[in-house]
């Protein structure tokens, strides 16, 4: 059975290997160039006290900027593509061509047949995506050190060990829908929609920020830049911001629809009121004194200067940067656990429903 599985899927593995070699041939020289550029700038900026400006100076060309954004996007979609083009056809092709019945009429049981096929495709997907992710993690070390952005969606989803779990989940999901519908196009569409919903929308926005209890930090409404520290979520994008809320002295959130009357101001010219869930800020000049104006959830324009005199502050709930690898391990375990569901359903479909 292992020989048969190799014969069936060797072209897929060979194509993936070719793409991996081409990817490495591109990533290694460009990654070395980025790293040498960053190290050279780091070794000279101390003399001119400009190290804090490197993020706005290095890799700003159109080509460099395109590569830094495009590579993580490509790696993030590799598991999804494997789920669509490795997972979905794994069983639908067998059902359409009838080759599954040929195997089942031999001495091969359905359970063993399915187990061997799943092991080959899941292990193969894990190896391929693991290699792509390892290359991207190494290649991105200059950008990570410069921008402190490993918690961003693209970086987190394309680096470290999480993409391996993504791949296993994506392929197992594709296999399940392929066995369920027995129709390739329908299974492809359902798998694609569900993977995008889970991997790009639900987990990053509603699950990941809550793996551990967030830390809190209060900062002035008029000065969002606080003390310099790797664990303070001010301008340090290495942290994962859970939410930001304006609170009073008793840590109660401000009701933007009904703010303190003395802080409500006339809407300045050219100031657009914020829509639901959005904030629009302006800084007009009032008697020569800059005044910050904010409006949220369709409420009135409010002076942040006035709110600050009443004791209001910005309360930031965040996950500190040192939890990055903890979050990588937690999310890897989450996707591996989720993969058990489609794998179990696939066994039921093949062994029980189609018996």
Image: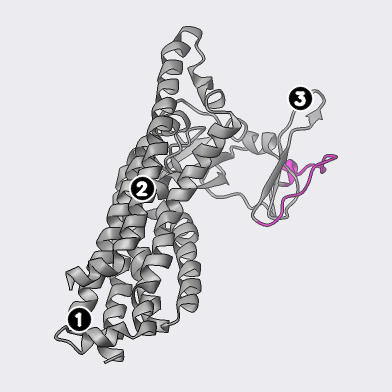
Residue at the bottom extreme? 355
Boundaries of the magenta span: 261-276
Judged by depth in the image, the label closer to the viewer, 3 or 1, is 1
Residue at left offset 64%, top offset 33%: 309
| Mark 1 burial class by Cα count in 10 Å: few <14, some 14-19, many 20+ | few
Q: Is residue 162 visible?
A: no
Q: Which residue is tagged 3?
A: 289
* Distance between the alpha carbons at the discs numbered 3 and 1: 76 Å
Q: Which residue is tagged 1?
A: 111
Q: Is residue 65 visible?
A: yes
* Distance between the alpha carbons at the discs numbered 2 and 3: 59 Å
Residue at the right extreme? 269
Q: Is 271 in front, or is 130?
A: 130
Callouts 2 and 3 close, C-beta under 8 Å: no
Q: Is residue 25 left or right of residue 337?
A: right
Judged by depth in the image, the label closer to the viewer, 1 or 2, is 2
Q: Residue 177: image x %, image y %?
A: 40, 77
Residue 342 position by quadrant: bottom left
């Amino acid at each position: 059975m292992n020989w048969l599985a190799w014969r069936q899927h060797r072209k897929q593995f060979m194509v993936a290997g070719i793409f991996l070699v081409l990817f490495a041939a591109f990533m290694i020289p460009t990654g070395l160039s980025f790293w040498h550029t960053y190290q050279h700038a780091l070794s000279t900026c101390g003399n001119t006290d400009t190290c804090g400006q490197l993020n706005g100076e290095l890799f700003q060309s159109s080509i460099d900027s395109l590569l830094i954004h495009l590579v993580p996007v490509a790696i993030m979609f590799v598991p999804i593509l494997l789920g669509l083009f490795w997972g979905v056809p794994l069983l639908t092709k067998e059902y359409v061509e009838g080759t599954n019945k040929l195997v089942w009429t031999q001495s091969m049981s359905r359970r063993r047949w399915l187990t061997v096929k799943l092991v080959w495709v899941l292990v193969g997907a894990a190896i391929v995506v693991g290699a792509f992710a390892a290359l991207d993690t190494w290649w991105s070390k200059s950008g990570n050190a410069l921008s402190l952005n490993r918690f961003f969606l693209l970086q987190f989803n394309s680096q470290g060990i999480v993409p391996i779990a993504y791949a296993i989940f994506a392929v197992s999901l594709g296999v399940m829908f392929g066995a369920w519908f027995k129709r390739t196009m329908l299974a492809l569409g359902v798998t694609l929609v569900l993977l995008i919903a889970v991997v790009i929308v639900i987990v990053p926005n509603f699950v990941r920020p809550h793996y551990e209890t967030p830390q809190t930090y209060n900062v002035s409404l008029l000065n969002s830049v606080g003390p310099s520290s790797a664990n303070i979520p001010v301008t340090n994008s290495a942290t994962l911001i859970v939410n930001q809320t304006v609170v009073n002295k008793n840590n109660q959130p401000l009701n933007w629809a009904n703010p303190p009357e003395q802080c409500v101001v006339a809407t300045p010219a050219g100031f657009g009121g914020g829509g639901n869930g959005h904030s629009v800020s302006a800084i007009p000049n009032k008697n020569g004194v800059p005044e910050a104006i904010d409006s949220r959830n369709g409420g009135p324009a409010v002076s942040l200067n006035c709110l600050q005199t009443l004791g209001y502050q910005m309360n930031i709930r965040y996950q500190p940067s040192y939890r990055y690898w903890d979050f990588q391990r937690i999310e890897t375990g989450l996707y591996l656990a989720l993969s058990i569901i489609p794998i179990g359903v696939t066994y039921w479909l093949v062994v029980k429903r189609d018996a």
